[in-house]
Image (cartoon, rainbow, N blue to C red):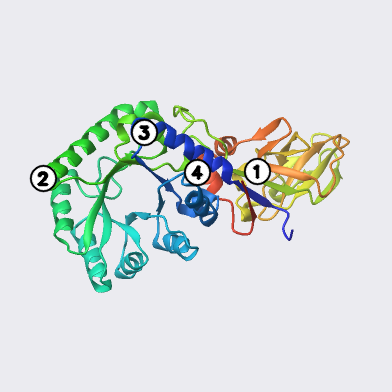
Amino acid sequence: MLYATVATTHLGNIRANLDGVRARVCAGRPARQVLLAIKANAYGHGAVEVARMVEATGCADRLGVATVPEGLELRDAGVRLPILKLSHALDADETRAAVERDITLTVVDAATIDAAEAAAAALGVRRPVHLKVDTGMRRIGCEPDAALALCRRVDAAPHLRLEGLFSHLPASDVPEGDAFTAAQIALFGRVAADAEAARGPIPLKHLAASAGVLAHPDAWFDMVRPGIMAYGHLPDPATAATVPLRPGLSWATAVSFVKPVAAGETVGYGRTWAAPRDTWIATLPVGYGDGYSRLLSNAGRVLIGGASRPIVGRVCMDQVMVDLGPGNPGRVAPGDRAVLLGPDGGEEITAQELADLMGTITYEVTCLVGARVERRYAG
């Protein structure tokens, strides 16, 4: 091992989470599909390896990416599953690359439809597209009253076929958003029904991401798009935990140095922590350069030998210090394992704990894990 800081992706847990999604949404409707959101390097879990597991096991039917390069990385790795780019391509180069490598494009207006048609015509292929409708997120997508005309524009394009119609729910993760979410679901249902009445069936109508899967069965339609729940976390602590979830990532490093510090001495940049009594300090070779947030300075903790050890001083770019206590009672020594995220003995540090300390969400905690952290994959 060339670097002591290691993040382990638990592929078996991700598979179990996706199996739980399928069991929930496909009961009584086995043809309903599951698209795994695998953007942002699978939320920090390793997109290629996760995609290969999904393809080998069949725990999801499709993959969703945010950028064309994310899709190309999967194609270059030999992944053959359908891939949907969840937002529209921004220029001709992106559009052509997606069409050439069979990455399904999202279209949002006449210009993106025409660009997709031009690229497919130039390559001599016919490709599916999904039309994004804005039902309340106010981010991207056509207005609901423009959807039918855009569906017909796709139908008139000889090198395109309308495979999907979709939207997104911005407040489905918390109970106080239920009324807004219900209105969105109803609006999307009306848009889809009007389009199908006018031009025939649309194979994949989809609206529900993780929170929709967990809390809003009316949003399931023909396909669901789990993201954060597939990696083992609720979208929000208030979201209904209707599917058992297992964490998809653990993160650990090793103690690099141990030293005594006298009462009153300060530790770290800015001298933000002073020892209240004689104690022992351990240094760990991990920092914000690895994605271990500086917001955890004087706030976070690690597990060493199953015992919780508080972070003291500021998190550095490459190192962090923890207080072992007077006399170093656990006899912590260089080389001992230190858990940053995950279980150790009877204790566990969860992504939700870190998110709460950082004032953020679990999505960011796992996405922050940096490129220089060694990656391992477990079944």
Q: Residue at x 63, y 59 (%)?
A: 372
| Amino acid at pointer 1 | Ser
Tell me whether circle 4 and circle 2 mark residues in contact (CB < 8 Å).
Answer: no
Identify the residue position indicated by label 4 in the image.
Answer: 363
Tag of residue 297? 1
The Cα atoms of the two marked residues, 3 and 1, are separated by: 32 Å
Instruction: Please state which amino acid type lies under the numbered disc 3.
Output: Ser
State the quadrant of the N terminus. Answer: bottom right
Nearer to us of marks 2 and 1 is 2
Residue at image x 31%, y 34%?
219
The mark lying in front, picked from 4 and 2, is 2
* Residue neighbourhood size for the residue with mark 1, other residues' Cα within 10 Å, grouped as few (<14), some (14–19), many (≥20): many
The numbered dot on residue 172 is: 3
Answer with mark 4 or mark 1, whichever residue precedes in sequence. 1
Q: Is residue 274 above or below residue 110?
A: above
Q: Label 2, label 1: how many angstroms apart (C-alpha)?
A: 58 Å
First of labels 4, 2 by sequence position: 2
Residue 58, image x, y percentages: 46, 46
Q: Earlier in the sequence, mark 3 or mark 2?
A: 3
Separation of marks 3 and 2 at Cα, in angstroms: 30 Å
Q: Earlier in the sequence, mark 3 or mark 1?
A: 3
The alpha-carbon separation of the residues under discs 4 and 2 comes to: 40 Å
